[in-house]
Amino acid sequence: MDYLSIASIVCAAFAVSFGAIGPALAEGRAVAAAMDAIARQPEAANTISRTLFVGLAMIETTAIYCLVISLLLLFANPLLA
Amino acid sequence: MNSPLESAALFYIGPVAITQAIVMTWVIMAVLVIGAYLLTRRLSLHPSKRQVALELLVDTLDTQIRETTGAAPAPYRGFIGTLFVFILVANWSSLIPGVEPPTAKLETDAALAALVFFSVIWFGVRGAGVGGYLRSFAMPNPVMIPLNMLESVTRVFSMFVRLFGNVMSGVFVIGIVASLAGLLVPIPLMALDLLTGLVQAYIFAVLAMVFIAATVEEGAHGPADPDPETSLQKKDS
Amino acid sequence: MNFDFWGLGLQALNAVILIWLLSRVFWRPVAAAITRRQAAAQTLLGDAKATQDKADAALAELTAARAGIAAERDKVLAEAKDAALAIKADAQSEAHAQAETIMAAARSDMAREADTARETMNAQAGELAVDIARKLLGELPGEAVQAAFLQKLTDAIGDLPAQDRAALVAAKRVDLMCPADPSADAKTEITSAVQQALGEAVVLNFVTDPALIAGYELRSDHFVLHNSWQADLAAILKEMRHAD
């Protein structure tokens, strides 16, 4: 197996794993803050949870970016073409 | 395993390769238009349950647009609403076995993002004039012109990749799990996919609305919040 | 990876067509329906408001009319009360006045009757007294009384003012009234006494009048000298009447 292929696979795995760490921490903080806000103001729970979902999707997008990069490395690697 | 980034052509019409996503888009279009036609055939002053549901949908959309932009929702209703409905139906079409949602393909998402890009220009020129639209690049100050121009492309590219990545990853993961573990195992992932599809459709529509509104406002009145993400937060909080 | 720009264009076209179709078929009709219903609801609300206003106005009118009726009733009652009071007062005052008139008339009648009765009684009493006196005096001895009266006559002539005496003297005929026909001696005696008192010679024409009871009186055409019981009694009677 070509070392380029090995490097691509390893890099794809790194991209996904490290790309998951940041969004995981960020989502944890966002959910904690949202819980705090809901505990303080239960009457605003609807708005807060809607904003939380949108925000979580936004944060998750960074992980998706990493996934896309890893897929590009795996399936559309210009060096392997 | 097939690459999720590629799509095989079913047949060709001239130079245009007709893929499964395009056919699926046509199906969705037909279903939506015929369904809408059937649903809106008999609208009256004394609404049936069906009409009440439709009006609730439109009213909710209007409320969202008004809360996001503070403008009258009528000009944007068709564009934003259709974007949301089409992306939602496309995302959820993955529930049908053997169907790959068109939004899981690069071309469809790129086309939607390009539509948003051009609609920002269209609504910006329509709302503030050509000068107003061009002035919106100089907000908050002329130093920002190159960054704003770059941002106007990258934000729609971000939308494109976000929508594509989410839907495609959902379909991809479900495919992998189904091929590895069996028939019923991916059901929780499919449920998660439903939620993701709804949220992504909502985000896509809201972001399009925010971009349009920001451009119109900046062109007409001066500086508004140029950052779509903070605008979104400000709206929702 | 192959990015198909034909596919992108086709999908964009599809999306534009879908947006157009849905705008025509879905968004605009539903929004129009919403607007129409809102307008209808507004119209209905306006109608309801108008009807409500009308009803309120009618109610207010009714209330005002009722209040007017009550006020009118009060007024009529008050008027009737006033009229009754006035009639009562009139009747009372009239009755008072009539009673006063009747009482006054009765009082005056009584007073007049009493006066008349007293006068009559006085007159009767006076006449009775005069009769009694006349009878009593008639029983007195005539000669002595006549002599006393002659003396009184001469004194009275002496007391007369000169003018009267001259008038008496100048009179052509002087009547001397006597209660009874005097004798010749008495006539001469009287004539001499009178002449002596007058100081002039007068012709005395003796006239008999029993009404004098007693006494002598001189009468000429212009002059009367009372000197008799009759005159005295008449004077007393007159005084008694005046005293009332």
Image: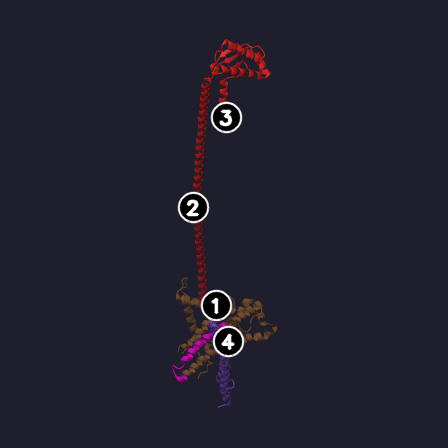
Chain for mark 1? B
Please state which amino acid type lies under the numbered disc 3.
Ala
Q: Are marks 2 and 1 in contact (CB under 8 Å)?
A: no
Q: Give the colour chain C carries in the figure.
A: red
Tell me which label, 4 or 1, sits earlier in the chain: 1
Residue at numbered disc 3: C243
Q: Residue under label 1, please give it.
A: B63
Cα–Cα gap, marks 2 and 3: 71 Å
Q: Main secondary structure of the magenta part?
A: helix
Q: Colour of chain A?
A: purple
**Amino acid on which disc 4 is placed:** Met
Q: Amino acid at mark 1?
A: Thr
Q: Chain of mark 3?
A: C
Front residue of A44/A53: it is: A44
Task: Report, in whole angstroms, how far the alpha carbon at label 3 lies from the one at label 4.
Answer: 151 Å
Q: Is residue B229 visible?
A: yes
| Residue C231 x %, y % | 50, 18
Task: Identify the residue under disc 4.
Answer: B159
* Discs 4, 2: same chain: no
- State the image quarter where residue B100 is shown: bottom left
Q: Identify the residue under disc 2.
A: C73
Q: Nearer the viewer, mark 2 or mark 1?
A: 2
Q: Secondary structure at mark 2?
A: helix
